[in-house]
Amino acid sequence: MIPTPHIDAKEQGDIAETILLPGDPLRARFIAENYLDGAVQFTSIRNMLGYTGHYQGKRISVMGTGMGMPSFGIYAYELIHFFGVKNLIRIGSCGAMQPDLQMKDLILAMASSTDSGFVRQYNLPGDFAPSASWKLLKKAADTAGQKGIAVRVGNVLSTDYFYNESSDDWKKWAAMGILAVDMETAALYMLA
């Protein structure tokens, strides 16, 4: 089924096997305009912009996903199942939960705990902590190290809440060693 209800690319080859996924579609456009050579827009449904171009000779795509697991889940599912995307790389911001983390620190999520209902679709008899592809995670950590970029690898929390009325809940997660909180990582790892 190409195009899909949410991605109006005309054929599977319009999207590269590797895609960067920021939440903000304007960030996707910024990346395409400033970092990709020969970028071509492949989707704009609901103003969720997606582009394919080349970075240092490698074909790569970038596309916005919106905020949260439901929105992210729609796009990731369609990219994997209908467009044959193999490497989905979520790029974006998160909230630090450990006091030693600083602005602009690079966090690589090894696994993602979640308080979301997104995992319920799998009808599992217990809790599931989805994890990253070790091969891709190690490659990212090694590359950062080679470039002298400080990186933290560890677990994150993906939540459905941007503002949580239970203001002390984060302390319980932080005590378990959770590095940061976001709204998408668990969905990415479950769908991959």
Image (cartoon, rainbow, N blue to C red):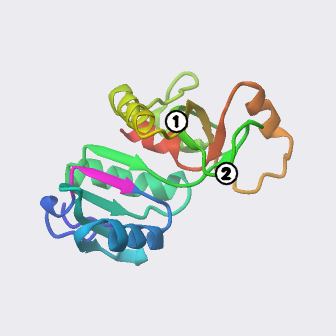
Is residue 135 or residue 6 the one in the foreground? 135
What residue span does the magenta drawing correspond to? 16-20
The verdict on residue 167 being magenta is no
Vertical position of residue 107 compared to residue 32: above or below = above
Q: Is residue 154 left or right of residue 136?
A: right
Pointer 1 residue: 109
* Residue at x 34%, y 74% (from the top left corner): 33
Numbered label attached to residue 182: none
Q: Nearer the viewer, residue 186 or 142?
A: 142
Q: Which amino acid is tagged 1?
A: Ala
- State the image coordinates of residue 180 (x, y, percent, origin top left): 65, 40
- 100 lies left or right of 36: right
| Residue carrying label 2 | 103
- Distance of mark 2 from mark 1, alpha carbons? 16 Å
Please name the amino acid that badge 2 sits on. Met
For the point 22% across and 65% down, the residue is 53
| Residue 117 at x, y percent in the picture | 59, 43
Of labels 2 and 1, earlier in sequence is: 2
Which type of secondary structure does the marked residue at label 2 adopt? Answer: loop
Q: Secondary structure at mark 1?
A: strand
Locate residue 8, reporting x and y percent: 25, 71
